Image (tube, helix red, strand yellow):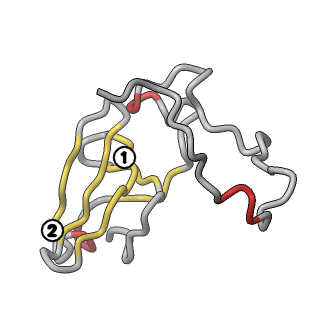
């Protein structure tokens, strides 16, 4: 009846509750699946009950970050590449001898 294996980052629609949620964690020790709904609420399902739940896979909503309350400026942009001149330059790892602050 339900989706057989949950995966982190996957979105599902619960046909019973009429809600969309994302799987955010899988706890193998406790046997639980932790989810977050669009409104930011956190939920937890028992791994044994998961296959019997009326779930279908769903596409991520357009504003899937709404639960995290991120502004457009706060969102991670994949095209903002962080590339220093040379990652392997040993001079980048040397700490300065001078402390630019107050020493009391």
Q: Which element is circle 2 on? A: strand
Please indicate whether residue 45 sits to the left or right of residue 79 in the image. Answer: left
Residue denoted by label 2:
46
Q: Give the residue at x 38% y 31%.
A: 67
Q: Position of residue 56 (x, y in %)?
A: 42, 59
Please indicate whether residue 56 sits to the left or right of residue 77 in the image. Answer: left
Given residues 11 and 99, the one toward you in this image is: 99
The image shows residue 17, relative to residue 47, as above or below, that is: above
The image shows residue 88, relative to residue 36, as above or below, that is: below
- Which quadrant holds the N terminus? bottom left
Q: Give the residue at x 27% y 74%.
A: 51
Report the number of discs: 2
Given residues 70 and 66, the one toward you in this image is: 70
Q: Position of residue 58 (x, y in %)?
A: 50, 52
The image shows residue 29, relative to residue 65, as above or below, that is: below
On the image, which quarter does residue 54 sit in? bottom left
Q: Are marks 1 and 2 in contact (CB under 8 Å)?
A: no
Q: Position of residue 44 (x, y in %)?
A: 18, 56
Measured in 3D between alpha carbons, the distance from the residue under mark 1 to the one under mark 2, in whole angstroms, is 15 Å
Residue denoted by label 1:
21
- Which quadrant holds the C terminus? top left
Residue occupying the far right of the picture: 85
Q: Position of residue 78 (x, y in %)?
A: 72, 45
On the image, which quarter does residue 41 sit in? top left
The image shows residue 101, relative to residue 28, as above or below, that is: above
Q: Which element is circle 1 on? A: strand
Given residues 72 and 83, the one toward you in this image is: 83
Please indicate whether residue 64 sits to the left or right of residue 13 in the image. Answer: right
Q: Earlier in the sequence, mark 1 or mark 2?
A: 1
Density class for disc 2 (Cα within 10 Å; few <14, some 14-19, many ≥20) is: few
Q: Give the residue at x 80% y 50%.
A: 84
Density class for disc 1 (Cα within 10 Å; few <14, some 14-19, many ≥20) is: many
């Amino acid at each position: 009846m339900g989706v057989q294996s949950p995966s982190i980052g996957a979105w599902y629609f619960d046909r019973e509750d009429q809600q969309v949620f994302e799987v955010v964690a899988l706890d193998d020790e406790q046997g639980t699946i932790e989810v977050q709904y669009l409104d930011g609420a956190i939920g937890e399902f028992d791994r044994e009950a998961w296959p019997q739940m009326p779930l279908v896979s769903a596409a991520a909503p357009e504003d899937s970050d709404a639960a995290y309350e991120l502004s457009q400026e706060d969102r991670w942009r994949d095209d903002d590449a962080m590339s220093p001149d040379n990652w392997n330059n040993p001079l980048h790892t040397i700490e300065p001898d001078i402390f630019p602050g107050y020493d009391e």
